[in-house]
Amino acid sequence: AQKITQTQPGMFVQEKEAVTLDCTYDTSDPSYGLFWYKQPSSGEMIFLIYQGSYDQQNATEGRYSLNFQKARKSANLVISASQLGDSAMYFCAMTTGTASKLTFGTGTRLQVTL
Amino acid sequence: NAGVTQTPKFQVLKTGQSMTLQCAQDMNHEYMSWYRQDPGMGLRLIHYSVGAGITDQGEVPNGYNVSRSTTEDFPLRLLSAAPSQTSVYFCASSYIGGQPQHFGDGTRLSIL
């Protein structure tokens, strides 16, 4: 069985600063995918970034990058140049093999301040 | 391009009532799933489907039924609602397994 751990219930960051949200995972399957989703206060789930277990390079999508450290089983999300609109709940999740069953962490609430 | 559409957005039920949460996607995705989100917890998988006519249980399936008669639709049925089923329910879909899932906007369900 797979498990996702997010140890930061809440984080604060100043506008225009970078922030790292931590995520560690556990699985015995060599093939897996790691995902980050954003949930604003309006409630919808927004896909941000994906990293496959066999990908050699860290994934990047605009201001989002995934710091993938396979040996440490970590998949931290880095948001550069934070904006007020980045204030939201952020979930790390994973799938294993070819399944499409997401296992989620408990989330990190990010608050961006002026 | 509607994506994943969930109805209703809000619903209040009495204990023991039954109802169906609707989910439809127009992206020709094979994979569809239902999750519930409770305070302080991440989303948990209820049921999922890898294609029309094929469904399977997730982490928390008790009290829920699903069917997948078409590629587009994946309804979730509450057989006899209980207060413990008060939650926000999300439907999601993806083209193939292991790929990013697209989520609907959620259904907020309260059971009194």
Image: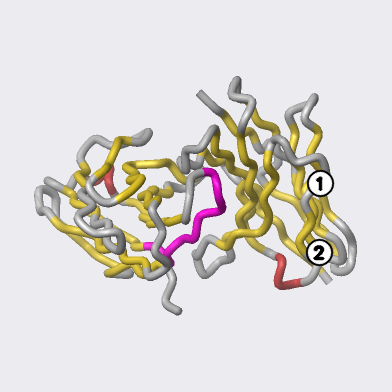
Expressed as whole percent of the image width and height from the top left, the position of residue B6 reads 33, 67
The residue at the point 42 percent across, 67 percent down is B27
Expressed as whole percent of the image width and height from the top left, the position of residue B110 reads 27, 57
In depth, the one of A13 and B48 nearer the eye is B48
User: What amino acid type should be assigned to the residue bearing mark 2?
Assistant: Arg
Q: Residue furthest top?
A: A28
Decide: is B112 above or below B48. below
Q: Which residue is mark 1?
A: A58
The residue at the point 30 percent across, 59 percent down is B71
Label 2 packing within 10 angstroms: few (<14), some (14-19), many (20+): few
Disc 2 to disc 1: CB gap under 8 Å: no
Q: Which residue is mark 2?
A: A63
Q: Is B106 positioned to the left or the right of A85 in the image?
A: left
Expressed as whole percent of the image width and height from the top left, the position of residue B64 reads 22, 43
- For mark 1, give the secondary structure: loop
Predominant SS of the magenta segment:
loop
Mark 2 or 1: the one toward you: 1
Q: Chain of mark 2?
A: A
Expressed as whole percent of the image width and height from the top left, the position of residue B68 reads 23, 52
Q: Which mark is residue B57?
A: none
Q: Count every numbered label the image shows and give the total.
A: 2
Q: Residue furthest bottom?
A: B1
Decide: is A70 above or below A59. above
The quarter of the picture where residue A23 lies is top right
